[in-house]
Image: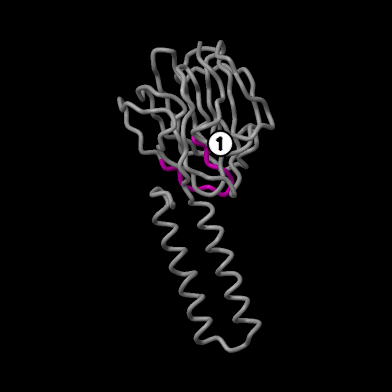
């Protein structure tokens, strides 16, 4: 299934790719040019379908679990001073999303949205440390009886649009879709320092399924 957050881009690209394929079959005579157009259009269409795919996921049962909000690779797990929402020391878990990953983001915990802030920033490569502070990003804080969690949708070098449908005071459920970052990006998750972290740098994550940490 194709994510609703990418309908605008997906259907535009799909239309032009299919139009190019049909026109090349009907009107292009030189075989090398015809097959070149067919090949490039087919590859672009396949990449677009792959990028905007939105598979179903099932969140693991259990209270206090912090679930990965993004597919990708964990590039950092470290202690930081988080004053945006937690107001204390926190463990930052950074997930790098390559263009080949599913880019739909999901809520890491069940709770109430208590913080939203959009930052119009730069576009450094998402795997660089300064991307967490300097790049365009959407900061989201969710709170429940176990504690607070802050997570950031961070645009990368290629990404130019962050989609977030959450609203202040909204009740959300762990594993539910809430948005996406288009064309390569990163998501940072800040959990209380006392939370039991279950992942390490180099691990692969699946949005809505992989347990990052547990609130005690």
Is 158 located above or below residue 75 in the figure? below
Instruction: Identify the colour scheme used.
Output: one colour
The number of callouts visible is 1
Q: Is residue 17 left or right of residue 36?
A: left
Q: Position of residue 25 (x, y in %)?
A: 52, 82
> Relative to residue 126, is residue 25 depicted above or below?
below
Most extreme residue toward the right, as rendered? 202
The residue lying toward the viewer, choosing from 75 and 160, is 75
117 left or right of 78? left
Q: Quadrant of residue 81?
A: top right
Q: Residues within 10 Å of mark 1 (few under 14, many from 20)?
A: some
The secondary structure type at the circle numbered 1 is: loop
Can you name the residue that lies furthest to the bottom here? 29
Q: Is residue 94 magenta?
A: no
Task: Identify residue for label 1.
Answer: 206
Q: Above or below — where is 180 with respect to 213? A: below
Viewer-side residue, 129 vs 151: 151
Image position, residue 15 (x, y; %): 43, 68
* Residue at screen point 44% across, 51% down: 1
Where's residue 102, x and y in %? 53, 45
Q: Position of residue 64 (x, y in %)?
A: 47, 17
Please report the residue visible at 36 percent of the width from the left and 25 percent of the height from the top: 113
Residue range corresponding to the magenta coloring: 153-163
Q: Tell me which corner region of the image, top left, top right, bottom left or bottom right, holds residue 89.
A: top right
């Amino acid at each position: 299934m194709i994510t609703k957050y990418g309908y605008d881009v997906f259907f535009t690209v799909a239309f032009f790719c299919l139009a190019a394929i049909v026109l090349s079959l009907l009107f292009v005579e030189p075989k090398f040019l015809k097959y070149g157009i067919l090949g490039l259009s087919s590859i672009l269409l396949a990449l677009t379908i792959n990028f905007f795919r939105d598979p179903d996921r099932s969140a693991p049962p259990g209270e206090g679990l912090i679930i990965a909000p993004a597919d990708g690779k964990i590039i950092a797990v470290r202690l930081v001073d988080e004053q945006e929402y937690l107001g204390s020391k926190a463990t930052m878990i950074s997930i790098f999303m390559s263009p080949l990953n599913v880019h739909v983001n999901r809520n890491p915990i069940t709770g109430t949205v208590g913080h939203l802030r959009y930052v119009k920033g730069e576009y450094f490569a998402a795997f660089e440390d300064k991307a967490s502070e300097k790049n365009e990003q959407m900061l989201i804080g969710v709170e429940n009886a176990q504690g607070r969690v802050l997570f950031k949708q961070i645009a990368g070098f290629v990404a130019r649009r962050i989609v977030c449908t959450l609203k202040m005071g909204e009740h959300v459920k762990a594993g539910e879709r809430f948005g996406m970052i288009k064309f390569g990006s990163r998501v940072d998750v800040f959990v209380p320092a006392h939370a039991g972290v279950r992942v390490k740098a180099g691990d692969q994550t699946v949005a809505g399924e992989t347990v990052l940490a547990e609130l005690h």
